[in-house]
Image: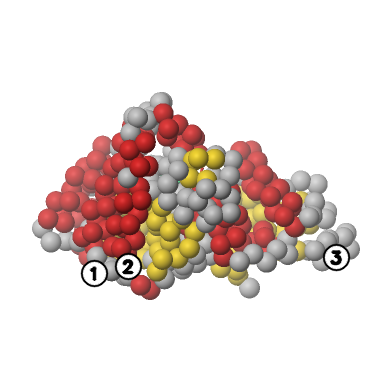
Amino acid sequence: MSFSLDEKLHTATAISHPNIAFIKYWGNRDAALRIPVNGSISMNLDGLETTTRVTFDPDLQSDSLMLNSVPADESACRRVSAFLDLIRSMAGISLRADVESRNNFPTGAGIASSAAAFSALALASSTAAGLKLDEPSLTRLARKGSGSASRSIPDGFVEWLPGTGDEDSYAFSIAPAGHWDLVDVIAVVAAGEKKVGSTEGHGTASTSPLQTARVADAPRRLDLCREAVRTRDFDALAAVMELDSDMMHAVMMTSRPPLFYWEPISLRIIKEVPRWRSTGLPCAYTLDAGPNVHILCPAAATDAVAAHLEDLGGISQILRAAAGGPAQLVL
Ligand code: DP6
């Protein structure tokens, strides 16, 4: 497709959810293409969403980016422009774009927004540029913006295959959102920007002597997790999900420089959750590259988990998210 100055503006809006990984992505084999060293499995988070509108406009001299109605900082602009360059080269256009993105979840609460951001951007910008990508191709495109964004394109419970290169590193749904009534109860324990972002962290993962063992055992954990999701076996999911989170954080803590994402309250919750589970309350924890604790539980256990968290104190906010659907265009 080609654009000329007198054609109408090319615009599209997409909406997407963040996701929480049960089996984590940590470390790249190819950092530029974001080909991960291991596969991962996640659940999209319903109710939390990013809405992004992209307009390719012949009147623009450069790309512009607004985040929650405020002009984005330089590094966010550069990352988005680099992503739009991919779109431009795929579509054979040179037009600059106006990008407006909004999150409905609290900014600065440490809820990873790059997955929702780049999955929404991939869908909106490719559509606005006239590209008609199938789902696997869209997941590969989103992956190049942020690895975890590949998992926010398909529906519900999603696996991202590590692959060996650009073509075979893609994500697909292993079960739709309605398959299992799991809820992510998110204990927001610290506000503010994290000190070392995941992109930087992926780069130092291989400096940990534990990373080789973590990666070598990943296929086994992926099999256990996929089967636990397929059969809705909460105890099996709890065991493999907590192990996988602990292994990733062990790698983080033993990398150079070391990354300690936990706050004292994070560790308190990590120690409490298995205790609650031993009293018959189904719940299990996982943490991403930050101090917030995600507690997964069946919907029926949500209120009890939230009440336990409130009793602990020291938590600034509790969010709840069921399994969410795929990234979608807003028509
Ligand atoms: C700990 O996808 O945020 O949340 O590709 O550099 O954007 P970039 O990294 P990102 O890494 C996510 C790391 C994680 C684990 C996970 O979501 O699998």
Q: Provide residue 145's location: percent of width, then percent of height.
A: 58, 48
Return the residue nearer the eye: 9 or 326: 326
Return the residue nearer the eye: 208 or 217: 217
Q: Provide residue 318's location: percent of width, then percent of height.
A: 32, 55
Q: Is residue 104 above or below residue 80?
A: below
Q: Can residue 113 be seen from the camera position used here? A: no
Dot 1 beta carbon under 8 Å from ligand 1: no
Comes first in the chain, label 1 or label 2: 2
Dot 3: what SS? loop
Dot 2 beta carbon under 8 Å from ligand 1: no
Identity, as a three-letter code, of the amino acid under mark 1: Ala
Residue under label 2, please give it: 230
Q: Marks 1 and 3, how far apart in space?
A: 53 Å
Q: Is residue 75 above or below residue 131?
A: above
Comes first in the chain, label 1 or label 3: 3
- Identity of the residue drawn at 28% across and 68% down: 232
Label 1 close to label 2 by CB (< 8 Å): no
Residue under label 1, please give it: 300
Dot 2: what SS? helix
Residue under label 3, please give it: 7
Mark 3 crowd level (few <14, some 14–19, many ≥20, 10 Å Cα) = few
- Identity of the residue drawn at 42% across and 46% down: 38
